[in-house]
Image (cartoon, rainbow, N blue to C red):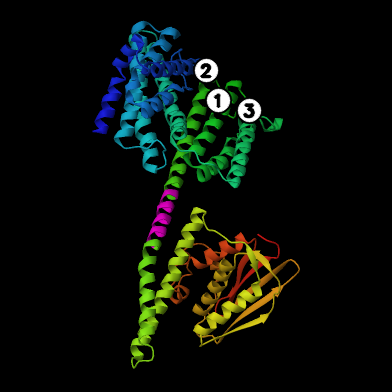
Amino acid sequence: MRKDMNKRLSRAKGLNGIRRFLAGDDDNGIALLTVAAVYFGTGRLGLSLGAAHGFATLVWLPSGLAVTALFRWGSGLWPAITIGAFLLNLFTGAPLLVAAGIGIGNTLEALVCVALLKREKVCSRLDSLHDVLVLVLLAAPISALISATLGVGSLLLGRVVDWSAAPVTWSTWWLGDMVSLILVAPLLLTWSTLAWAAPSRKRLVELGLISVSVVVVGLFVFLGLLRPTHWQQYPVNHLIYPLLIWAALRFGPRGATAVMATFGALAVIGTLQGISPFSTGSLWLRLLFLQSYIGITAATTLILAAIVAERHALEQRKDEFISLASHELRTPLTCLLGYSQLVQRKIAGSDHPLVLQMLASIETQAQNLARLIADLLDLSKIQAGNLTFAEEAVDVDTLVREVVEQLQQTSVQRQINIEGSAPGVIIGDRGRLSQVVVNLLTNSMKYSPQAEQIIVHLTSTTKDLTVSVQDFGIGIPTSEQQKIFQRFYRVAGEHKQASGGLGVGLFIAHQIIEHHKGKLWVDSTEGQGSTFSFSLPWESP
């Protein structure tokens, strides 16, 4: 019902909107007037920049503006496009019927483009590969074809241009509209729909860096500023690619469209002044090559940004699932663990040693599962930036010895020896640091099943303290050592078979140590064992 109502409202904005506007009884007329005025103004600007036979230009903003207006506020605004285009061409010198024909073609262009986008359920965020491909390969070229064909046809029928000029006029018209639809429309659509969120300090610094870089590189490449005189003849337009990739990877479709639009504007200015890399030949030829370059670059950048945005969305959904699943598993697991402990106490001392052994096994496995769930919850908090830390005085030497004593009780087949000491106190989270030590020790036990001992080394200097856990197990291949601190990464082959974990423990440990301004690393020789070490500065995090 709501969809039908929206359709009726959209239709009501059409001819009825014009009637109500003329009668002065509907605010919708203000929207019609605004869109028509913006269309007219930007069209005048475009036609002043090297128009072919006065009516077709390679720099054409209105197509993107029109599609954005109809997509965001409804196709019922189409009369504004017709009025703006009609008055623009009439003012340019077209006969009445020719101006009307061009206005109809421009209106159909916007309507067809929006209809194709909505038929394919394209989102205005343009954050999926499907949406970008529909725009670039379907909606934009087809709708631009309609406008160019009807526009040039009207000029031919009105004898404003002759047949010999038709190919140049048509190609200019089509390319100008096409570039507008894949550069201007994405810029306006993405920036008009996404919610604004307060960026972090690091994000602001990165935003400042890329903004300054875009301006400096754009001025250097397209306006020749800061460029040595003997470099003027060399093409340097490829220098913008790293910044486009940076914007697409780190700032998504909005960042990519903003950077591309900035480069496009500087490129047009430089080309008009004859100082950009596209400054050979007539003005029309220069703009032809420039707009072809901008169109291809914009489409490529949009595709890259959409692919990255899709991946980020999948990562976010995965993290949400992990968090939800972990919370849902926690309650039944707590009940299972509690009941197993209760039954053990009830039958303690009875003549049921096998039952007690089985209950102890249930408790052990439940505790292992609880640790896995805790790791998953920590992982989801890290990904969301919500992992909390306490600040308290921590004696790391004492902490390590307490953890070793606890684990030694459950590992009678190997001895955990402590060598050295690291007296002193740091400011940090005792529970999180204990989690790191437990993780390193349990990993050492897991990957050295035949070893008789594990050695914990404690050392300190005036600047920091170091804790090292040395095992004599299977070791880690050199090629894998830099990857083991990545989330969900597990060493292949024999190492993976030896582990039943999820590959998140070391990632979480690395995040905890990094929060404390410390370092975590590994030294390993395959077949001889591994030594995991972390250092912490004495000053507080």
Indicate the amino acid at tag 2. Leu
Residue 100, quarter of picture = top left
Query: Could you give the CA–CA distance between mark 2 and mark 3, rounded to whole angstroms?
Result: 17 Å
Please give the residue where the numbered disc 3 appears in the rendered image: 223
Marks 1 and 3 sit apart, C-alpha to C-alpha, by 10 Å
Residue 196 sits inside the magenta stretch: no
For the C terminus, the quadrant is bottom right
Report the number of discs. Answer: 3
Against 475, residue 6 (above or below) is above
- Corner quadrant of residue 344: bottom left
Is residue 322 found inside the magenta-colored segment of the image? yes
Residue tagged 1:
268
Under mark 1, the amino acid is Val
Q: Which residue is mark 2?
A: 49
Which sits earlier in the primary sequence, circle 1 or circle 3? 3
Secondary structure, magenta segment, majority class: helix
Q: Residue at x 30, y 24 (%)?
A: 10
Q: Marks 2 and 1, Cα distance to the nearest angstrom?
A: 9 Å
Magenta highlight range? 312-325
Tell me the element at label 2.
loop
Q: Is residue 298 left or right of residue 227?
A: left
- Is 288 left or right of 120, judged from the image as shown? right
Element marked by disc 3 = loop
Name the foreground residue: 483 vs 3: 3
Residue type of the residue flagged with mark 3: Leu
Asked if labels 1 and 2 touch by Cβ distance under 8 angstroms, the answer is: yes
Q: Residue most toward the bottom?
A: 351
In this rendered view, identify the residue nearer to me: 524 or 288: 524
Few, some or many residues within 10 Å of mark 1 (<14, 14–19, 20+): many
